[in-house]
Amino acid sequence: MTIESIQNEIIDEFSMFEDWEERYQYMIDLGKELPLIEEQYKTESNIIKGCQSKVWVHAEMKNDKVIFTADSDAIITKGIIAILIRVFSNQHPKDIIDADTSFIDDIGLKEHLSPTRANGLVSMIKQLKMYAIAYQTQLN
């Protein structure tokens, strides 16, 4: 699936819920399904800077696609990173770099987060794209 089609799927899923309490519960459920990072990668260097909670992300390249795993010590944050990983994992680095992330506004996520969580969201996207840039450089 393309990044855009995954984003559209997420927009559709979030539109099924009446209110933000249901959407938060859905995000928590997504976080529970997150492909967890192996303990060996829960290191200081894999923590995303700028997040209030701890969020670890590990990336590796397989068959020219970036595979992400992650974890967080906070349930909402774990749901947020789960959404981002669903969108960006198993994608070509260039597609990740070029991806538009306006789907986050379309589902209303940023406006329903505290300012510190919203900053953390931006930091997560930035970090995932930085991994993609590093892998794209290797491919060139």
Image (cartoon, helix red, strand yellow):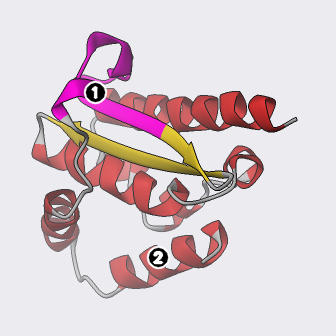
* Residue receiving disc 2: 11
13 vs 64, left or right, is left
In the image, 1 versus 104, the foreground residue is 1
Spatial separation of the CA atoms under disc 2 and disc 1: 31 Å
Residue 19 is tagged as none
Magenta extent: 39-59
Quadrant containing the C terminus in the rendered view: top right
97 vs 5, left or right, is right
95 vs 58, left or right, is right
Say if 62 sits above or below 41 in the image: below
Q: Is residue 54 in view?
A: no
Picture coordinates of residue 28 (x, y %)? Answer: 14, 59
Q: Pick out the residue farthest to the right.
A: 140
- Does dot 1 land on a helix, a strand or a loop? helix
Label 2, residues with CA under 10 Å away: few <14, some 14-19, many ≥20: some
- Does dot 2 land on a helix, a strand or a loop? helix
* Residue receiving disc 1: 41
